[in-house]
Image: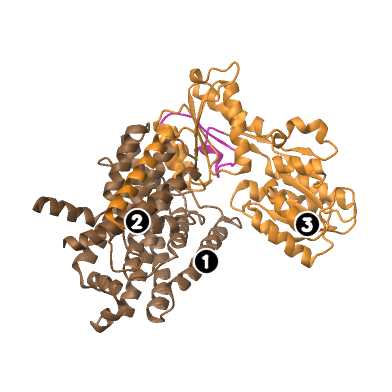
Amino acid sequence: VTTINRALRSGTQVPVVPILLVAFIIFAATTDGFFSAVGVQSILRDSAVLMIAATGATLVFLIGGIDLTVGSTIACAGVASAAAMHATQSIAAGVVVGLGVGVVIGLVNGWFIGYWGLSPFIFTLAMLLVVRAAGYLFAAAFGGSTASSIGGLPSAVFRLGRGVTLGLPNVFYVALAVMAVAVVVLRSTMFGRRVYLMGDSEISARFNGVDVRRVKFAVYFTAAVISSLAGVILTIRVGSGSPAAGDALLLSVIAATVIGGTSLLGGSGGVVRSVFGAVLIAMVTIGLDLAGYEFWDQAVVLGLIILVGATLSSRFSIAGRLLK
Amino acid sequence: MSLKKSAWGAAALAATLLLAACGGSSGSSPAAAPGGDAAAGGTYGVSFDKMNAFREGEQKAMQTAAGQLGVTLDLQVANTDAQRQSSQIESLISKGSKAVVSIPWDTQAVQADAEAAKAANIPFITFDQAPADLSWVTFHVGGDPLADGTAAGQFYCKAAGGQPFTLLEFQGSLNNDNGVNRSKGLNDAIAQGCPNVKIVAQIPTEWKPEPALAGTENTLSKTPDLNGIYAPTDGLLPAIFSALQKANRLQPVGTDGHVTIVSIDGDSNACKALTDKTIDMDVVTPLPQMTKDALQVAIDVAGGKPAPTPNIKKLAGLQVTPDSLDQQKAQVWGCSA
């Protein structure tokens, strides 16, 4: 009984895993090229950017907030990073500049939402447009009037972005590292406990002496920096920085978080869940690509997965609380 | 909702995935045609950047060409996502495609895709959308956006006849070669040939009709006697017509109040507009030749022949007017769509 109870409890920690396994088995059994080293590496490689971005988004969701600048930050940081790499032929310079973009956006988001008390939805919606425009303007200025993507990156970028170490894509290790750090911070630090407490009830957190404004600032700042890292990794992955790259990522990030089972209302969920949600999205997308489906067919399947996945995650979360 | 209902939901999802995984084959095109043995020629990976009416025309032309050349296509659509296109191309290579034929979404990111193909020792051909650097690819065949834009500009010069002429210019996507050069060709031709033609507004559309609708309405409100509209893609025509109709300016060619329209592509919108005489000229992209050339080079190089030099071929569009449509209809690919 104890073993069953333990299994149930661990299952409720990451409720999307059974869906992930079922989907993997179905595609592996039915789709040519899916269950192969290249197939699995493609899934992990394509998951990496989404995993990183979903980690930042999860922090924001855990305090009951929302950050709509995710996609724009990824694009803008990716463009800046590519420009720096192009100009210096140094990957390190690109990483620093890309993260610098995230720092600036994070300071603005954190300050206005945390200390000025502006609505996260409205403020980050405005920032989404501003940051997206900044990405296009930067690309246009760099590219000489056309807002094209920026290439001409050092050749090491291609080896890094597409390469594999010990059987796993290089960029996937970065995503794992980001996830691991976030897990440790959320589970083992005072800051992590305050994040969950704020998500449960901001009023309670305030009564317990939590400096709510500071936590909000820290969360939005960290989320933007993590998003900018996702932008840098995207640039390294594809070998260019495009201002249009983040357009579709916002919805994917939210979908990964929701499928994973993190509550949009705050207080419940975690980074590991969102990461598995991201892997599920990448896996289904690649599986359906290999099966020869058009993207509109894929959208229907992904919609169903979001619906069922989020529902299952919600049910398992409740069951998990009852088992505690 | 109970856990039992959730379980039913999970079962339904699993069934959906199973059906999806088992049923998918729309991307592969056996493309068998009389005289062509599809299986004998091998499979060629095709990677589209997105899907729209123009790409559907390209897909159809590509499938026809594959049938004629006796090969099978494995088509993937990246839905305007560079990372996804890279992943799809990696899959096509790993599945054993004899060559990859691609319309790149990101003209810089395609470098890494081409290098992946090179590492696998297979040809990498681009068509329609040129990469930023042609040295990356085995071969590129596309339209000639500069020549097409120039043809449009020269047409407006002729239509103006030395008189003052106001023109609304829609632009495509300014982050790719086709968008930039279709605009540049128009502007250069007008600047050099007819300073009496005044471009009253330049509106980027990203190839989408919504900005064309709003742009036409707004320009007509500011310039009610607007003389001409330039559409760099036929996909904008329905939106432009809608706005003109609302302003009672949608008149056939040759009648009072007609707005002179030149468009590019040659899709079904253009075919209908030429038939209805609502546009003055369409510069028809030779899709069948473009797609066949791309596939032919892929087959040749995969078969051991050297890559063509130079490794680019530009195909200028065919200029079709309502008066010449009957003679040229067979070459307007949108008329057979």
Q: How many marks?
A: 3
The residue at which mark 3 appears reads as B244
Relative image position of residue B233 (x, y in whole percent): 68, 47
Q: Earlier in the sequence, mark 1 or mark 2?
A: 1
Number of other residues with Cα within 10 Å of mark 3, as a class: few under 14, some 14 to 19, many 20 or more: some
User: Drawn colour of chain A?
Assistant: brown
Residue A197 shown in magenta: no
Looking at the rendered image, the disc whose residue lies closer to the viewer, 1 or 2, is: 2
Colouring of the image? by chain
Residue plotted at (59% across, 20% down): B33
Which residue is the site of mark 2? A310
Q: Is residue B141 visible?
A: no
- Using the image as rendered, state which of residue B127 and residue B30 is in the foreground: B30
Residue B124 drawn in magenta: yes
Using the image, determine if residue A104 lies above or below residue B332. below
Circle 3 or circle 1, nearest the eye: 3
Q: Indicate the quadrant where residue A206 lies.
A: bottom left
Is residue A176 visible from the viewing direction of this image?
Answer: yes
Disc 1 designates what residue?
A129
Left or right: A156 in relation to A186: right
Label 1: element kind? helix
**Chain letter behind tag 2:** A
Gap between marks 3 and 1 measured at Cα: 31 Å
Few, some or many residues within 10 Å of mark 2 (<14, 14–19, 20+): many
Q: Within 10 Å of the Cα at label 1, are there few (<14), some (14-19), or many (20+) other Cα atoms?
A: some
Residue placed most toward the observer, A316 or B1: B1
Q: Which chain is orange?
A: B
Q: In the drawing, what numbered circle is on residue B198?
A: none
Residue A108 place in picture, x, y as percent: 43, 74
Image height check: is B276 above or below B73? below
Query: Which portion, as a residue range, is magenta?
Result: B120-139
Name the dominant secondary structure of the magenta segment: loop
